[in-house]
């Protein structure tokens, strides 16, 4: 009997039209847990480094996390992994919602898809019955519309559906996979789905998911729920409201957006508007949000209400769901001061299926190129004067890949190079060819420097967490924070608490504080917690992302052990996360990732310290067991039972036989 | 002679659909509690509560499994509340031939909410305990009722459903055959 997992993957070859139910090796669960970990293993094993992301040989994996489908609160993430057409590296965009648990109940841990269907199809997984069905009638349909049509035609209102919109069908490099309540957005994984001729996946499951130690597991779940209640009553003092609670930032419930609107950059990641948040703006945005938000909603088995149902008939916006910061990304990129615009364009963008981070930035980039005369009326015939209208115009061009939209559809990095004429200079906010959150600050933050540079999920929110983002202003607040900071790893309590207690005192200013060894430990802790979540399918909003989350390094090993029957302690879990993280790095190293790619945007901070930054990166690589190029050393790989990776990298000449990179 | 009046605790769950966030934790924990061994597995398909969950219509409606019924209704109702049309049978608690709700997925035997009956009794049903948004609130009240009728047991309900499905003769044949086989295996 397999616990927590089902022990079966579905293997689909869309070129052949074949469907297989394949048992998985329990040893891989011990080594990698599941989710991202086992996805990385499949990609390492089956996708050679020369595979073109949009070719039939690329693999697209829809994976459940190890704990999805068990009663562990918030374990509902679907981890979608593939090689990104935009970054040319492995991407593992993830989504909450209801798909992963349903897949478990249908009897599968993953759906592994390769090949390319000759015509548009969708996949219908109904327990043991799995079909590849015609979807030509769904061509061009919106992502949410598609889900509804499929449920109707199957007569299965309880089927969970993930679908692409027009952007995915047209292989836009930042196309998303939409699932109503949530979406897997980053890295153009929707384009990979489109390139395979796969419009949607629909799942219905009514089988049992087992846990190994029922009473113990249930008791641990109850403790998590108790802590969620405790945190609801005890917000963190001394931080902005948006950071005080748990879950994804509660931006559907909270209308106070002073922190985002004054700290993040507007336009093409250019301008901070420190005086933006006035009483008038606050009042107008509050009204707008109250009109738009119909209900606060959750993902599967989670009491948090990070999402909202949005409906805004006055704007002609039909119902969709939204969460977090996506209400602001279009508003800020378009320099539009009203929130109505955000609710309005985000709904349309979701039907087309595009990423809410990259899309607004690509459009702001295009507007700048037009204003600089690099793009002209010949490229943008009939381009409106008003910025909001321009964004709607550009969205249509991009998802249809019409005219200049065909180029912009590749994202800022590739478009800048294709357009030329100096457009490259306007590509100032990408890392590893991928648009980043628009933040431009003054003094180098050495902790964030490491995270921006080395994060492999290419989104800062998926590596940061646990730590306050700024020093607490008073001694009392610092003491209050550390007094019940139970989440700190064993052996690090004194160092991490001392850091919070003294940070803000004279002599603790960036960039030469904190000391580099402490930076390494703090970053490694933050990243490791994410890699654990990515394998269990627990939402980062209850775990790796917020301050003082209900899941942490002390209860996660107990929960995973009780669910699976494996004996995993804190060190063991840390080791698995390190193995998974290193394997993802190895996949990317094999595809060419090197130190030169690990650079935050030059203007991310005004004050930079190139020599000191190089020193920090050297020491962090060393701490991770990587060489100076950021390549995992032979001994590191062997220690993590990744000998086969070491051998492959040596054979390819990426690693020398002695363990040092070339 | 008049039947004697007895005091009875009536257990109620007050359902506030406006507070439901659609997380379906109630389905998860219900199915885990009723699993064998307890909490050993879960499967919302076996839950005795179901959230009718149509987010894009803003429909969030937790419904508990009630009595088993052998025949479906002659007519069907649709409700329109606050402009939202609820599918026919949405509010109905019956395990009934017209739909898949409130039946064991494999055997199609009927399911019924028992308010998490257990020994010792729980303070409140688990669906209520796990609903941190208070869409489900447990309430007890005392009522005077006529002397209680004998309530059929779960097993009796299950057999009744089998009889409705296969006919009395078929079920009694099968029971007799199983009894004979068991007796034979004991002897051996």
Image (cartoon, rainbow, N blue to C red):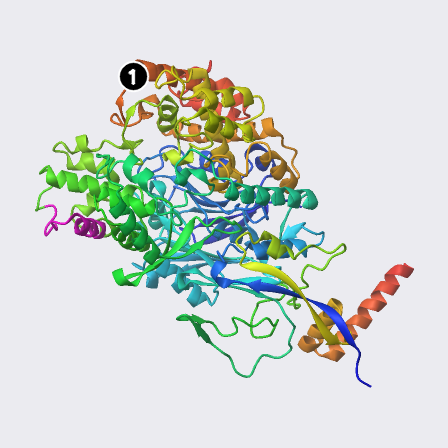
Q: Where is residue A7 in the image (x, y as percent from the top left)?
A: 59, 45
Which of the pair A567/B55 is nearer the observer?
Answer: B55
- Is residue A392 part of the magenta span, yes or no? yes
Which residue in the structure is indicated by mark 1?
Answer: A609
Q: Which residue lies furthest to the right in this view?
A: B187
In this rendering, the count of numbered labels is 1
Q: Position of residue A237 (x, y in %)?
A: 45, 35
Mark 1, secondary structure of its residue: loop
Q: Where is residue A221 in the image (x, y as percent from the top left)?
A: 61, 44
Q: What stretch is highlighted in magenta?
A: A379-397
Which of the pair B4/B13 is nearer the observer?
Answer: B4
Looking at the image, is B90 positioned above or below residue A405?
below
Which of the pair A255/A215 is nearer the observer?
Answer: A255
Q: Which picture quadrant has residue A376?
A: top left
Residue A179 in sight in this render: no
Q: How crowded is mark 1: few (under 14 residues within 10 Å), some or many (20 or more)?
A: some
Callout 1: residue from which chain?
Answer: A
Q: Which picture quadrant has residue A61?
A: top left
Residue at 56% x, 54% y: name it: B131
Q: Position of residue A37 (x, y in %)?
A: 50, 36
Residue A49 in sight in this render: yes
Residue at 55% x, 84% y: name it: B74
- Is residue A158 part of the magenta span, yes or no? no
Residue at 32% x, 26% y: name it: A597
Q: Is residue B125 left or right of residue A105?
A: right
Q: In this view, does A78 lie to the left or right of A346?
A: right
Q: Is residue A364 left or right of residue A583?
A: left
Work out which quarter of the rendered image holds the N terminus of chain B and state it. Answer: bottom right
Q: Residue furthest bottom?
A: B1
Which of the pair A198/A446 is nearer the observer?
Answer: A446
């Amino acid at each position: 009997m397999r616990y927590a997992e089902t022990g079966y993957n579905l293997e689909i070859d869309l070129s052949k039209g074949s469907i297989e139910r394949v048992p998985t090796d329990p040893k891989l669960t011990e080594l990698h847990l599941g989710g991202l970990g086992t996805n990385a293993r499949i990609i390492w094993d089956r996708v050679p480094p020369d595979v073109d992301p949009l070719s039939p040989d690329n693999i697209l994996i829809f994976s459940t996390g190890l704990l999805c489908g068990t009663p562990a609160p918030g374990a509902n993430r679907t981890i979608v992994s593939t090689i990104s057409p935009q970054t040319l590296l492995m991407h593992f965009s993830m989504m909450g919602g209801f798909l992963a648990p349903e897949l478990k109940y249908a009897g599968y841990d993953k759906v592994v898809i390769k090949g390319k269907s000759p015509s548009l199809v969708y996949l219908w997984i109904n327990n043991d019955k799995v079909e590849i069905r015609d979807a030509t009638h769904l061509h061009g349909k919106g992502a949410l519309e598609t889900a509804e049509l499929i449920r109707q035609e199957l007569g299965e209102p309880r089927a969970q559906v993930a679908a692409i919109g027009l952007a995915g069908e047209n292989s836009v490099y930042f196309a998303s996979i939409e699932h109503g309540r949530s979406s897997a957005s980053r890295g153009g994984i929707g384009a990979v789905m489109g390139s395979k001729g796969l419009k949607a996946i629909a799942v219905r499951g009514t089988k049992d998911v087992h846990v190994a130690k029922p009473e113990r597991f249930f008791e641990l779940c109850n403790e998590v729920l108790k802590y969620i209640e405790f945190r609801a009553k005890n917000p963190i003092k001394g931080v902005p409201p948006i950071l005080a609670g748990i879950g994804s930032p509660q931006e559907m419930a909270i209308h106070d957006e002073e922190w985002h609107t004054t700290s993040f950059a507007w336009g093409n990641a250019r301008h901070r508007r420190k005086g933006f948040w006035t009483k008038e703006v606050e009042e107008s945005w509050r009204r707008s949000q109250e009109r738009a938000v119909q209900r606060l909603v959750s993902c599967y088995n989670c009491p948090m209400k990070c999402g909202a149902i949005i409906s805004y008939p006055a704007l002609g916006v039909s119902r969709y769901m939204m969460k977090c910061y996506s209400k602001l990304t279009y508003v800020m990129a378009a320099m539009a001061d009203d929130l109505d615009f955000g609710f309005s364009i985000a709904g349309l963008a979701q039907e087309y299926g595009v990423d809410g981070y990259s899309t607004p930035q690509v459009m702001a980039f295009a507007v700048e190129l037009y204003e600089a005369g690099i793009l002209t009326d010949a490229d943008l015939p009939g381009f409106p004067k008003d910025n909001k209208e321009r964004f709607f115009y550009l969205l249509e061009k991009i998802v249809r890949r019409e005219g200049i939209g065909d180029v912009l559809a590749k994202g800022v990095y590739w478009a800048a190079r294709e357009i030329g004429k100096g457009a490259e200079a306007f590509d100032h906010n990408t890392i590893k060819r991928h648009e980043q959150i628009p933040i431009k600050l003054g003094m180098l933050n050495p902790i964030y420097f490491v995270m921006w540079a080395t994060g492999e999920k290419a989104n800062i929110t998926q590596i940061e967490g646990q730590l306050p983002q700024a020093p607490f202003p008073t001694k009392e607040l610092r003491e209050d924070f550390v007094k019940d900071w139970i989440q700190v790893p064993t052996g690090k309590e004194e160092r991490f608490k001392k850091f919070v207690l003294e940070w803000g005192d004279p002599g603790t200013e960036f960039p030469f504080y904190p000391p580099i060894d402490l930076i390494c430990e703090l970053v490694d802790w933050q990243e490791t917690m994410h890699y654990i979540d990515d394998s269990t399918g627990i939402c980062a909003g209850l775990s790796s992302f917020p301050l003082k989350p209900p899941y942490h390094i002390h209860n996660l090993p107990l929960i995973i052990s009780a669910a699976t029957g494996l004996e995993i302690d804190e060190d063991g879990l840390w080791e698995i996360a390190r193995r998974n993280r290193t394997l993802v790095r190895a996949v990317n190293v094999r595809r060419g990732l090197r130190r030169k790619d690990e650079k935050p945007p030059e203007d991310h901070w005004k004050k930079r310290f190139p020599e000191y930054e190089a020193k920090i990166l050297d020491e962090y690589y060393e701490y991770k067991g990587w060489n100076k190029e950021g390549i995992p050393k032979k001994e590191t790989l062997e220690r993590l039972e990744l000998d086969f990776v070491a051998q492959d990298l040596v054979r390819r000449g990426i690693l020398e036989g002695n363990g040092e990179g070339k | 002679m008049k039947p004697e009046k007895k005091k009875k605790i009536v257990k109620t769950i007050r359902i506030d659909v406006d507070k439901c966030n659609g997380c379906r934790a109630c389905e998860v924990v219900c199915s885990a509690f009723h699993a064998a061994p307890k909490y050993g597995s879960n499967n919302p398909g076996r839950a005795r509560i179901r959230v009718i969950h149509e987010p894009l219509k803003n429909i969030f409606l937790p419904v508990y499994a009630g009595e088993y019924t052998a025949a479906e209704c002659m007519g069907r109702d649709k409700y329109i509340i606050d402009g939202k049309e609820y599918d026919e049978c949405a509010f109905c608690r019956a395990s009934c031939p017209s739909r898949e709700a409130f039946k064991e997925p494999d055997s199609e035997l009927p399911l019924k909410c028992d308010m998490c009956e257990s020994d010792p009794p729980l303070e409140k049903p688990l669906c209520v305990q796990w609903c941190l948004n208070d869409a489900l609130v447990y309430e007890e009240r005392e009522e005077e009722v006529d002397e209680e009728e004998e309530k059929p047991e779960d097993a009796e309900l299950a057999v009744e459903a089998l009889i409705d499905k296969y006919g009395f003769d078929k079920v009694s044949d099968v029971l007799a055959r199983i009894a004979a086989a068991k007796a034979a295996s004991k002897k051996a």
